């Protein structure tokens, strides 16, 4: 069933790209005198299956995708340039425009799927956009709804996979990941721990921005050898094993219920102050 769903998904993506490519017509966007990628300033959500294909074809890597609260991922947005990471400065356009697997949302602007009043269609920089085949555009619109439906189903499945990453489904793989997480925790100072980060297929540590005192009371509560913590918390260089174990225990018990109630953070970041506050821990 999984392979069949994937095949259906790829049929939708490929057909949508073909339909929209032949249904719309517009100015030469890669001409720098006309535009410099204004439409690439839109943040785009994508399903994991599409993200994996971009990686497979060499267009991107895992760091180019952040968690989304709409689909599974969102394309990394370059805040310095104000554009999607797929914007290629050399070609002055989208790196995957001709790939056949461009995200469906990227085709819609500025024409949409219809122009009932036959108005002049313009983007931010240029006019001259046209829908030259209404029938194909309408067919693409129906495919988009199916695409969105499949993306939402996948996103729900991905949320359940977080339970597995947290060990709800006991397995050798989850135990290994917790071992790696514990090693990560025990390699940093408690004042440098900002929280946890949900990555592609595992939970990792989130570094604090500067110095954090969130761990001070946690360490004081669970570390029996805590005399030095009151006056010299910042001098502690590593999280001890007993505190690391308690942190993982806290994570297992609280992260998934937090995500289920609050929704997934768009960046996958879950700071300690939010998790602690939710459980009224130390507040």
Image (cartoon, rainbow, N blue to C red):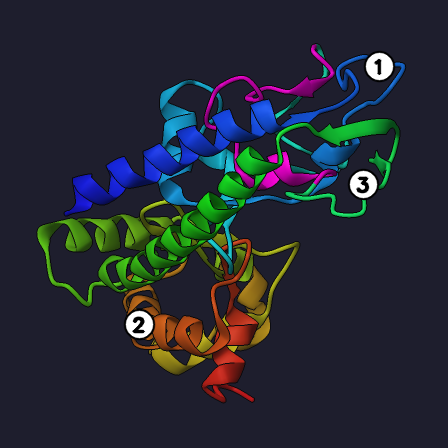
Q: Which residues are magenta?
A: 91-111
Label 2: few (<14), some or many (≥20) within 10 Å?
Answer: some
Residue 272: say if magenta.
no
Secondary structure category for the residue under label 1: loop
**Frontmost residue, 255 versus 128:** 128
Q: Position of residue 62 (x, y in %)?
A: 43, 34
Res. 118 mark: 3
Secondary structure category for the residue under label 2: helix
Residue 98: say if magenta.
yes
Secondary structure predominantly adopted by residues drawn in magenta? loop
Quadrant where the C terminus sits is: bottom right
Q: Position of residue 264 (x, y in %)?
A: 47, 64
Q: Position of residue 251 (x, y in %)?
A: 35, 69
Describe residue 18's horizontal placement relative to residue 85 as left or right: left
> Mark 3 or mark 2, which has the lower sequence index?
3
Q: Quick check: 29 above or below 102? A: above
Describe residue 120's horizontal placement relative to residue 107 as left or right: right
Q: CA distance from mark 2 to mark 1?
A: 56 Å
Res. 246 mark: 2
The image quarter in which residue 246 lies: bottom left
Q: CA distance from mark 1 to mark 3?
A: 28 Å
């Amino acid at each position: 069933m999984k392979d069949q769903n994937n095949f259906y998904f790829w049929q939708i993506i490929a057909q949508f790209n073909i339909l929209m490519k032949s249904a719309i017509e517009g100015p030469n966007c890669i001409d720098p005198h006309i535009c410099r990628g204004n439409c690439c300033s839109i943040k785009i959500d994508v399903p994991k299956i599409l993200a994996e294909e971009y990686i497979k074809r060499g267009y991107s890597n895992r760091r180019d995708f952040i968690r989304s609260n709409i689909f599974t991922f969102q394309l990394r947005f370059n805040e310095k340039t104000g554009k999607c990471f797929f914007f290629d400065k050399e070609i002055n356009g989208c790196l995957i425009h001709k790939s056949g697997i461009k995200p469906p949302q990227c085709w819609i602007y500025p024409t949409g799927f219809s122009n009932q009043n036959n108005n002049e269609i313009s983007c931010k920089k240029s006019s001259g956009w046209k829908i030259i085949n209404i029938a194909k555009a309408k067919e693409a619109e129906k495919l988009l709804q199916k695409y969105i439906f499949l993306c939402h189903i996948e996103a729900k499945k991905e949320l359940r996979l977080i339970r597995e990453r947290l060990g709800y489904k006991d397995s050798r793989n989850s135990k290994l990941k917790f071992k790696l997480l514990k090693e990560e925790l025990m390699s940093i100072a408690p004042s440098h721990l900002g929280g946890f980060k949900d990555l592609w297929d595992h939970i990792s540590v989130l570094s604090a921005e500067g110095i954090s005192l969130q761990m001070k009371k946690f360490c004081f509560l669970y570390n029996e050898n805590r005399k030095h913590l009151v006056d010299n918390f910042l001098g502690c260089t590593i999280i001890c094993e007993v505190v690391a174990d308690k942190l993982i225990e806290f994570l297992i018990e609280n992260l998934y219920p937090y995500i289920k109630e609050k929704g997934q953070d768009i960046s996958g970041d879950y700071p300690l102050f939010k998790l602690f506050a939710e459980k009224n821990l130390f507040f």
